[in-house]
Amino acid sequence: VVQHEHSFNSYIDIDNDMLAILTGDVGQEKREKAWNDATILFMTPQTLENDLRANLYDLHDVLLIIFDEAHRAVGDYSYTTIARQYIGTGDKAHVLALSASPGSEREKIEEIKQNLYIQHVEVRTDRDSDVLPYIQDVDFKWIKIDIPDNFKKIIDILNDELKKVKNFIKEKHFVENKDTKYITRKDFLEIMKKARMRLNHEFNMSQKQQLFTIIKVISVGLRISHCLELIETQGLQAILKYIEKCKREARKERSSKSLHIFIDLARRQSIHEKIKRLVEDGKIHPKLEYLGRMLQDFINSNPDSRIMVFANFRITVEAITNHLRASGIEKVSSFVGQQSRGGMKGMTQKKQEEILQQFKDGVFQVLIATSVAEEGLDIGECDLVVLYDIVPSAIRTIQRRGRTGRKRAGNVVALMARNTRDEAYYHVERAREKRMEQNLKNMGKKKTVNLDTFTHGKK
């Protein structure tokens, strides 16, 4: 909201008294006064929803609501509640929804339209004539990196164990006409959901026991699958700490049977010992090695640049930060969400704001961030964005690479471990992005909306 208020102040000739920022940090009395006095309000959706629920004010005099990052308007997110209440105020209600990435599936886009009462879709790409003057060149590179043999030996062990799980669920007819190599983590989760639903309506004890066994086996499969993702795409420290965390959990009194099975599997195959030995020998993921060299070269050539590195897991953010500092890149900071997760403490909002300001000021030159930095933050201009791992999401990939090339030319580098999930996720993401663009193109083939109806109202 602060970023948008600054933009209005910078680009529109308007009295500053007509603008107001309303968030939960602003007291209730001040919010009520600002609502009555200002013409253009910049608000977090949660603040507006809470104030409407408390009858602090209503939306009858509002001429237009703009929903930024409109792809969030699904489920019970505040946008949907606000839009429903706003449309109920009468014919003068107008909604403008903005999103760089509304989703790849037509059903998802239609859900957003329905939730925000959108009747017309305008689509723009970086190839449109009215967008081109504002687009900066962005150099995008995909870098494929080979996995070393000592990693592959552990990966082969995990794949063999995962194959046993896949064969088991196929024998139980939970997947039909599907080669086991194409059974994914998503399939595991769907089978788990079906098994639990059947469990709620099953009274035969023998059948119940079978369902419990299936759930237990799939739980083990999910842990193995997670280990594979960690060693293939993240690094040795990530999988080592995960297994150690599982060991600690297994020692607790009410730990699950599936957890004990997984720990026993890891012990029998000496997975923990093999990984620990590699870590003690100073082995790290080759993507991490490549990243350190690449960033050092980029900083040497661009000493005043700003760099963002995205990683999916906090443990990876920590590993990257430590590795870069050990490599001589000192102006680096981690950036994670506010909630504590997986035994790792979150950042307070104050700390987040402090780091972002230091990044803008050059105190930090490199920011290593989780998904929390993908959208909704005033991060400033970046010269290089690095995707340490690939996410199979068009929305998140677009948001991540959109952190560069805003005011000046930028660079995006995506690191991909060859013949791993990175490659699979890459193909999924590219297909979804192309599908999103085609769906939007088809939905946007309608008459241009006429804005002459914006004639009444105060806000």
Image (spheres, rainbow, N blue to C red):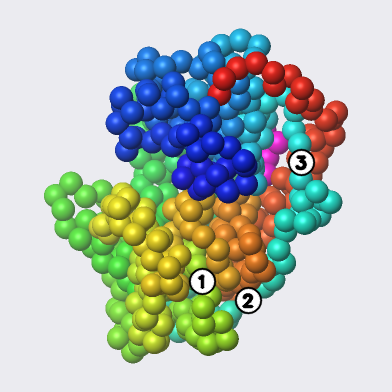
The answer to whether 386 is drawn above or below residue 147 in the figure is: above
Mark 1 / mark 3, whichever is N-terminal: 3
Tell me the tag on residue 123: 3
Quadrant for residue 29, please give it.
top left
Q: Name the mark nearer the viewer: 3 or 2.
A: 3
User: Residue drawn 38% across and 36% down?
Assistant: 23
Q: Is residue 376 rendered magenta in the image? A: no
Q: Which mark is residue 143?
A: 2
Element marked by disc 2? strand
Q: Which residue is mark 1?
A: 306
Q: Nearer the viewer, residue 189 or 336?
A: 336
Q: Which residues are magenta?
A: 104-108
Q: Position of residue 318 (x, y in %)?
A: 35, 69
Q: CA distance from mark 1 to mark 3?
A: 31 Å
Q: Quadrant of residue 182?
A: bottom right
The amino acid beneath tag 3 is: Val
Q: Main secondary structure of the magenta part?
A: helix
Disc nearer the start of the sequence (1/2): 2
Quadrant containing the C terminus is: top right
The x, y position of residue 237, in whole percent, is 35, 73
Residue 281 percent coordinates (x, y): 33, 89
Q: In the structure shown, which secondary structural element does the residue marked by tag 1 occupy? A: loop
